[in-house]
Image (tube, rainbow, N blue to C red):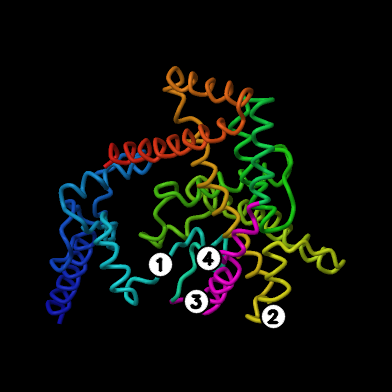
Amino acid sequence: MTTELSLLTVSLLIVFLYQLYRIGSRDSTLPPGPPTVPLLGYKAKFSSDCFRSIHLKLSEWARKYGDFYSLKMGPETFIILTSAKAVKEFLDMRGPSTADRPAAHIPEQVHEGYSLAFGRYSTALGSRWKLMRKTVHAILTPASVEETYPIQFAESVQLLYDLLHDPKSHFQHVRRLLVSIIFSVLYGKRVPRYESYEATSMFDLLHLEEQLFLPGAQLPVDTFPFLKYLPEGPLAPWKKKCRDLKGLHQRVYFGSLEQCKDRIDRGESVGCLMEQIFERYQKEFGLTWQEVSYIGGTLLPGGIDTSTSLLQGFILSPLPFECSIQPRNQKIADLIHKHFVDAIDVFTQYEGALQQEDKEYVARIRSSLV
């Protein structure tokens, strides 16, 4: 009996060790990819700063393994798509099997499943996520976009004024521009100065999200779930950051929405998008206060973050070519004083050429990364 028990124990131990060894290994049915190591998959091949330039490594592997390949991260498998053809095949033609998102524990602690950016179809809140998405589609129509043109024009005029009178603060001026446009469109209130609470708190919020959500910023709690149970402190700094970010969400998203609700109650609606949701879609779709708040909380950073970076890059990109650009700028300035109509025609051509050059400039940067 003792011998049989010993054999059973040894057999179970061998099976356990084999299964443990298999963690991080690539199944034969998966596409090819970088070599793996037991338990960790490919992670052991990275330094602590690797995720800051992971796009370079992914591009290197794309050249070696093709349009799509697999990566092992502990027990999880990721399929990397590196071409438009691969994206269309996997996300479009196989939509039902690729529509959902993977679990994201850290964002879940902040948004509680109500974020349009991190929401999942397969959870209990999947049906609510679809209603939130339906609401966004209802308010973001071509007609509603055209209605924002006067706001964009007015804020652009202030940007030009600020750049002329304080060019050294161009970084902050661009930030103020985008914050003011998006806040005006969504919540019906301007942000006239970068020092305004809305601007400073918004970028504090974005920076904290970067610290929490960027790949490699925190321990891989989704890959190794036992890390979720680490006590708050040096080993789990994300727990305090999640609380801080959630508090910022409450003050920025929920606070701005409260101001919209107060205007509606006073009969002073200005027609902004969040007021439209309150006055129509909240009742039509049965949206809760939290769901409406996170609709704004998804659109707000989505409209500010990438647009700010793009415009700042557009302003900075001609600087290396200042010697060749400055004479052309002077030519336009001289024409404005003499022949305004001709100046408009020249400026239109110049603006088109500048936009085209900027596109090629960005394309060259992207090609250098690939």
47 vs 3: above or below:
above
Of the two numbered discs 1 and 3 on the same chain, state the one appearing first in sequence: 1
Q: Which residue is mark 4?
A: 116
Residue 236, position as x, y percentages in the image:
49, 51
Q: Does 123 lie within the magenta span? A: yes
What span is in magenta? 122-149
**Three-letter amino acid code at the position of disc 1:** Arg
Q: Residue at x 46, y 23 (%)?
A: 325
CA gap, disc 1 to disc 2? 28 Å
CA gap, disc 2 to disc 4? 19 Å
Q: Are marks 3 and 2 in contact (CB under 8 Å)?
A: no
**Three-letter amino acid code at the position of disc 4:** Leu
Of the two numbered discs 1 and 2 on the same chain, state the one appearing first in sequence: 1
Q: Which residue is mark 1?
A: 101
Residue 22, position as x, y percentages in the image:
19, 63
Q: Residue at x 70, y 53 (%)?
A: 184
Of the two numbered discs 1 and 4 on the same chain, state the one appearing first in sequence: 1
Q: Does 370 lie within the magenta span? A: no
